[in-house]
Amino acid sequence: MKEDAKKQHCRRKPPWLRRATLLLFGLVVALALGEAGLALYNRHFRWAEFRKPIAYTEDGDRNRIGVAVLGGSTAQGSPTAGFSMGVSLQGLLYSRCGMGTRLQSCALGGWALEDAMRAWWNSAETRPDVMILYSGHNQLFRYYPPGMTPPPLGVLGHLRTVRLLLHWLCVRQPYEDHATYSGGLFCDTPIPWYERESGLADYRAQLELLIRHCEENDICLVVVVPAANYTMPPNRSQYAGPPQRRAEALRLFKQACHSKYFQDDDDTALALLQRVAGFCSFAHLHYELGEIYYRRGNTRQAVDQLARARDLDGYWVRMPEPYRRIITELSAKHDVPLVDMRRVIRDKLGRAVPDGEVFYDHVHFNPDAYMALEEEILDLLLKERAAGLEPLPQQIPLPAEWQQRIAVTSANRAGILAQAMNETRTAAADETFMKYPVYMIARDKLNSIKTDVLPPQGRAFVANELAQLETLIADERQRMLRWTQAP
């Protein structure tokens, strides 16, 4: 008996082990319940505000069509709302269809799709006949300061509960305290992969809810696939390749930049860049390759490399390809009219590469692009017979006030470009390590302005911008020279 009791006592678990087992079991149960609860919430209750119907009123005027525009700064009209999306369409509708327009703009700089939809749900009163959506560039950019530090344990981002906690830790960082990126060429603190996946899933859910809302309220939704300037440098590079060759990639890339920017030797730079591309990949590598191909007129190679640079950007402000695929997929699934801005740029504006002839900066395009886009939208609306639109047998000349409103004069074109370059100069210093090419692009654009068309105040503004850029370029040139020559 004494021997049996002794064996039983030996087999009994120590108290600390029992407590640890119970604690672990409790955590697993709590995690399982949290995962199930979040899955249920995401499926049925998240974005509940966009599932609610809007009590629209009807516009009794049959001689005008209601047009709503949703989006961010490009839809709003940046850097000036004088060329906001929908303004040209108003004139085209009058001229080609004899219809007046009630234009409702629900767009603001920095807004993601969620913001534009929330503003619409909170402010809309009169039902529009047509809704134009141009959104996708700000989906992650608005949440994170350039100098953000992702929380640890990213590998656990596969779990919804952990992802929710990590997201909270990410976005609670005060933007002002982390407004400047101070890292090197290779960024070790990119927007985490789980945030990118969550952002993509959120965009899909929001777009599908907007499509459903328009279907239920007999609103013709036209979705525009956003485009961006391929010839603007990316913000952030993440090295992807053999870890043991990372230092070699950086050394060769520095040599290539030195050859290109300080010796005007594109041939040597191209050979070095191609050598690096043979064993690794990162955003600035593909940008520099694409930029050389672009200047040499190798369109196919330029587009391929510049698109890869955009998609690999670790801190992107230009919508990457996965968002484009979601827009085209959902538009096809729900039979939603679609306008591809890249195709508009190619077919209507004659630019095989979306470049600085179309865009002022990364994403904001010039008045000619607004006009070309809205001509395409009207053609699509007439094809779809949206709101009973019919073309007139003969176009009506626009009244003088409308001609002035949508006119693209040398003076307003120069003024818009000067404002855009001011934004480029001030933003570039915060968001990227490779400031030098950005400053050079801004200076070249400012030098292209014919200042004699500007009023005195505008000429002074351009002169001041150029002076500041010259100082920045001189300082940045010295920094870049030291960097490219460093071992």
Image (cartoon, rainbow, N blue to C red):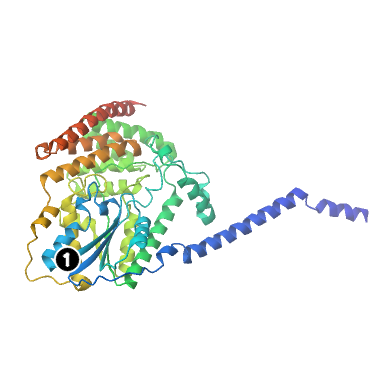
Which residue position holds label 1? Answer: 100
The quarter of the picture where the N terminus appears is bottom right
Q: Residue at left 48%, top 62%? A: 42
* Left or right of residue 391, residue 249 in this image: right
Q: Which quadrant of the figure has residue 429? A: top left
Percent of width and height locating residue 225: 27, 58
Instruction: Please indicate, yes or no, whether residue 227 appears anywhere in the rendered image.
Output: no
Q: What residue type is labelled 1?
A: Gly
Q: Residue at left 43%, top 62%? A: 47
Up/down of 410 relative to 209, above or below: above
Q: Residue at left 59%, top 60%? A: 32
Q: Residue at left 50%, top 44%? A: 151
Considering depth in this image, is 332 or 127 the residue closer to the camera?
Answer: 127
Q: Which quadrant of the figure has residue 268? A: top left
* Left or right of residue 24, residue 127 in this image: left
Percent of width and height locating residue 468: 24, 30
Percent of width and height locating residue 288: 27, 40
Up/down of 351 relative to 124, above or below: above
